[in-house]
Structure formats: C-alpha cells, structure tokens
Amino acid sequence: DTAVSQTPKYLVTQMGNDKSIKCEQNLGHDTMYWYKQDSKKFLKIMFSYNNKELIINETVPNRFSPKSPDKAHLNLHINSLELGDSAVYFCASSPGTSGRGETQYFGPGTRLLVL
Amino acid sequence: GESVGLHLPTLSVQEGDNSIINCAYSNSASDYFIWYKQESGKGPQFIIDIRSNMDKRQGQRVTVLLNKTVKHLSLQIAATQPGDSAVYFCAENSSYKLIFGSGTRLLVRP
C-alpha cells in the first residue's frame, strides 16, 4: 500500500548518458513534485505539476525534463548526465491544486550516481 | 543548532530527555510550516504542521512552536527515544512551494 513510489531506488550511470526516474502516487493527489537532495542533505524543489500541467520550474537546466502522463505519475528524464547531477531525487505529492498550505508526502528517493 | 562550516548541525541527547530543534525561516509572508523527519536511506516523513494563525500545536510526544515576530520555529520531542534519531527539517510554504531549512541531525544516546 505504498503511497508515493519511485523507481529505480539506485541508479549508477556514466557521464553523458540519458536516464529516467519514475514516480507514482496512489493517494489521489492532484499535485506532484520533484526535489533534489545534495550531499549536504539540502533539499530543493525542482518542478511541480498539477494534474499534468507544469506549475513550478525552479531554473533547472533544460537537460531535466519532467513528464506527467496522468495525474498519478510524474517522471523525470535527464539528458547528458553530468557529475554534478549525482544526488538523491525525491518525488512528492500533495492533495490540492496549488501546493499552497498543504502537506507534501515524499517517496523513498532515487540515489543517482554519475561516474 | 546553527550551521558550522559544511557539516549538518547535530543535537545529541540522552534517551528519555526532551529534545528541542530550532529553525529560522526566511519569508515573513509564509503562512504554513511543516516539520519533517528523515531517517537514513528514506524520504522525509511528515511529523507535524502549524499555520501562521497559531503559535503552538501539539501532537503525540511532539510540539511545534511558532514565533512570527522573529521568524523562528521549534520542534520539541518529549522523552526522546532511539527511534527518534534522524535528520529533522523545517519547511515553510511560500509562493506555492516548500522551502526547506538546512536540517538538524538528532542523535539519541542510550
């Protein structure tokens, strides 16, 4: 009965490759997010989607492209991976349409290591 | 705790004691605040929240205090247990997104 799930849990790849991370939530929430957590544990939002529409894009390089096929899924595709992309990526969701004043529920994270 | 260099601030407490974790937030217009707990290898987990029209909210063993005058938030954990060992983050809801603080590591000594 996992609420927010991500695959894969670990991803090790070479610089220059293209990879995708998948996220699914079974909470019936309308808004989904991607966060990046660096080696210092700092958590920063990257994107948010409401019902398949992009609502926040935090000046993330355009090598990162989120895709939301439906409101229960938000995938993250990364082109031309760089060493600095190594981090833990978290997906989250919240119930409402704006993300304002709402609790966000996080997935278990995807640990990306770029060699 | 306060940031020292690049390391995560750490609070070490004896099992059974009370813990107080502090957080300063940045935006005086923020109206919703959340504390999250992150255990090693896991995602942040919701602990307790508070809206800006309150200054205190209690949960089971946890209390959040909000001081809007000085933009300060604290999390109090009563009778700290080994299972409370984790990194704790405060987050403020500002402009339709959550802005996270830098985190405090709580270590519980047996």
Image: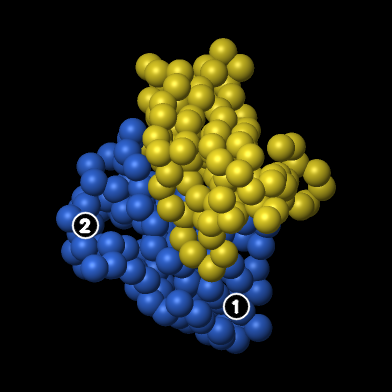
Chain colours: A blue, B yellow
- Residue type at mark 2 is Leu
According to the image, label 1 marks what residue? A113
Residue under the point 55% across and 28% down: B73
Q: Nearer the viewer, mark 1 or mark 2?
A: 2
Output the chain of dot 1. A
Q: CA distance from mark 1 to mark 2?
A: 29 Å
> Looking at the picture, how far across and down is residue A40, in whole percent?
68, 57
What is the tally of numbered marks visible in this picture? 2
> Looking at the picture, how far across and down is residue B78, in whole percent?
54, 37
> Looking at the picture, how far across and down is residue B61, in whole percent?
46, 38
- Residue type at mark 1 is Leu
**Residue B53 appearing in the image:** yes
Query: Which quadrant would residue A103 be assigned to in this image?
Result: top left
Q: Which mark is residue B10?
A: none
Q: Nearer the viewer, residue B39 or A109?
A: B39
Work out whether A2 lies above or below B68: below
> Looking at the picture, how far across and down is residue A49, in whole percent?
30, 53
Q: Among all residues in the image, which is located at the extreme right?
A: B5
According to the image, label 2 marks what residue? A27
Work out whether B35 lies above or below A109: above
Q: Among all residues in the image, which is located at the extreme top?
A: B69
Q: Quadrant of the N terminus of chain B?
A: top right
Output the chain of dot 2. A
Q: Callout 2: 10 Å neighbours few (<14), some, many (20+)? A: some
Query: Which quadrant would residue A81 be assigned to in this image?
Result: bottom right
Q: Nearer the viewer, residue B90 or B39?
A: B39
Residue under the point 65% across and 74% down: A83
